[in-house]
Image: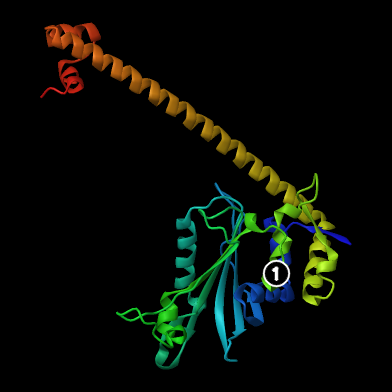
Amino acid sequence: MKITVANPIYDSVFKFMMEDERIARTVLSALLKKEVLTVEMRRHEHPNVTRDNLSMFRIDFAAKVRESDGSERLILIELQKTWLNTETLRFRRYLAAQYNAEENMLKEEEQRCYAMPMVAVYLLGHRVGDIEEPVVYVNHKAFDYDGREVANCDTDPFINSLTHDSIIVQIPLLHGKINNRLDKVLSVFDQTLVADKNQHVISLDGKLYEDDPDMMHLLHRLGLATMNADLRQEMNDEDEYFSAIEDRDTQLMEAKAKLSDLDAQLSDANAQIRSMAQAMYHNGVSLEVIAQSMNCRIDDLKALLGLS
């Protein structure tokens, strides 16, 4: 049984999906590989309403998670999604802003403040270098001088205030294989399942999700998105925006190629001029005559010939 749902690669659909608290817990639990007990979408000062030369959609969550030892702790999850190759500096600037935000501080006794432990999640619509794994976990560890891991550093508030873990998802490498819980959750982003002639929707095999109430809930919400006129219009707007970006990038690539050709032609011309000037100079022609024939200054000619 095929199920047709809205494509969450679109910012508008993704936001609609993640605004549902149950779905947010489902997605984040799978990514973190921990049980997310509660999750709250944070006040967001960086909405994606004024677009520049790329799309970078961000949602901040405060989540209470259960650790492997049964303990619970509050963490901040910075989820950033982009379609296009993105400057890493933009990610860093956004993380820096979150480190400095007062609302992300935890107050302890004696009025000491520590930054809330943070996990950065990147959903990328492009590949990262030559990395073949669709999902990459980058976890910070602490070591002594001899390279031995230092115990209990992962729970220290000072260390957690200065470092964070990252999860990187390369959407182009999602190819329909479902081997674990995360694969199943991320399958809704698999762009190889985009319906023919309509990239706004994804066609999924409903049998893969029938025994999973949380995933069926997620698919139901994505199904509702296909019937939402405002969301459909926003997807059309995103298509127009990225079409304009692609046209601009194509023009820039063509312009760079033309400039490269002109640079090569100029280099060849300079080499020919230099060869002619050297031949005349070695045949005893004075610098003044050579400069006059080439309509250039004596100093420029000397530089061309490598004369002091």
Quarter that holds the C terminus: top left
**Residue 154 placement, left or right of 133:** left
Q: Is 36 above or below relative to 229?
A: below
Q: Is 253 above or below relative to 7?
A: above
User: In this view of the protein, which residue sits in the foreground, 182 or 22?
Assistant: 182
Image spot of residue 122 (x, y percent): 57, 63
The quadrant holding residue 306 is: top left
Quarter that holds the N terminus: bottom right
Image spot of residue 34 (x, y percent): 62, 80
Residue indicated by mark 1 = 179
Q: Residue at x 67, y 57 (%)?
A: 11
Identity of the amino acid at label 1?
Asn
Image spot of residue 75 (x, y percent): 55, 80
User: In this view of the protein, which residue sits in the foreground, 21 or 210?
Assistant: 210
Viewer can see residue 199: yes
Q: Residue at x 53, y 55 (%)?
A: 128
